[in-house]
Image (spheres, grey):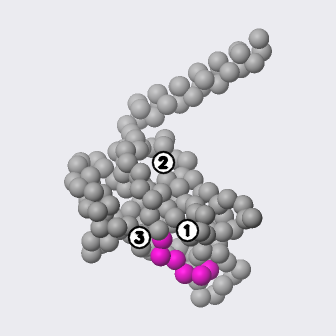
Amino acid sequence: MQEKINIVNKKAKFKYFLLKKYIAGLVLNGPEIKSIRQKKANIDRAFCTFFNNELYVNNIIIESYLNSSSFDKERNKIKLLLNKNELNKIKKELNDVGITIVATKLFINDKGLAKLEISTAKGKKNYDKREVIKKRENKVKIDRIKKSN
């Protein structure tokens, strides 16, 4: 049994309020899926856009597989596979001001297919981010006190 591939965008929860999650398939070629299986992908700056009523993810960095010469390091757009109802729901949500689509997790499912978990998100303000940091630090302090007693 192969190990679980689970590439997470840790910055997404910090920078955004995540609203709704969707799981989409990816249109990839051979070297790209092999690189993902070796965990050589980065989705920290990935976001999604609509083009011709289809959803594409931008800024996914997939490193080359065994120095393949016909393979570029960063493709401009990768098409996402969602059904029409999900695409329409996402489009309606995007009509609100300040809503964006962010890639949160890239994983391989039980059938061996690459899937991307995307979320509609609203950006956090600086004071929201500071509040998250304070809560995290307070939790660490409480855990230390409990451990010492």
- In contact (CB < 8 Å): disc 3 and disc 2: no
Residue type at numbered disc 3: Leu
Q: How crowded is mark 3: few (under 14 residues within 10 Å), some or many (20 or more)?
A: some
On screen, residue 52 above or below 123:
below
Farthest residue in the right direction? 148
Residue 72 is marked as none
- Total number of numbered labels? 3
Tag in front: 3 or 2? 3
Quadrant hosting residue 4: bottom right
Name which of mark 1 and mark 3 comes first in the sequence.
3
- Residue position marked by numbered label 3 in the rendering: 81
Residue position for label 2 = 12
Query: Gap in Å between the C-alphas at discs 3 and 2?
Result: 21 Å
Image vertical order of residue 138 relative to residue 33, above or below: above
The quadrant in which the N terminus is found is bottom right
| Coordinates of residue 18 in the picture (x, y in percent) | 41, 44
Q: Position of residue 113 (x, y in %)?
A: 56, 70
Q: Where is residue 79 in the image (x, y as percent from the top left)?
A: 41, 73
Q: At numbered mark 3, what does the secondary structure look like: helix, strand or loop?
A: strand
Residue 142 among magenta residues: no
Q: Compared to 69, does 123 lie above or below?
A: above
Structural distance between the alpha carbons of marks 2 and 1: 20 Å
- In space, the residues marked 1 and 3 are separated at their CA atoms by 11 Å
* Mark 1 neighbour density, 10 Å: few (under 14) some (14–19) many (20 or more): some
**Secondary structure under the numbered disc 1 in the rendered image:** strand
Residue that label 1 marks: 114
Extent of the magenta region: 26-31
- Amino acid type, residue under disc 1 in the picture: Ala
Secondary structure state at the residue bearing disc 2: helix
Q: Position of residue 132 (x, y in %)?
A: 49, 31
Label 2 is placed on what type of residue?
A: Ala
Going from N to C along the chain, the mark reached first, 2 or 1, is 2
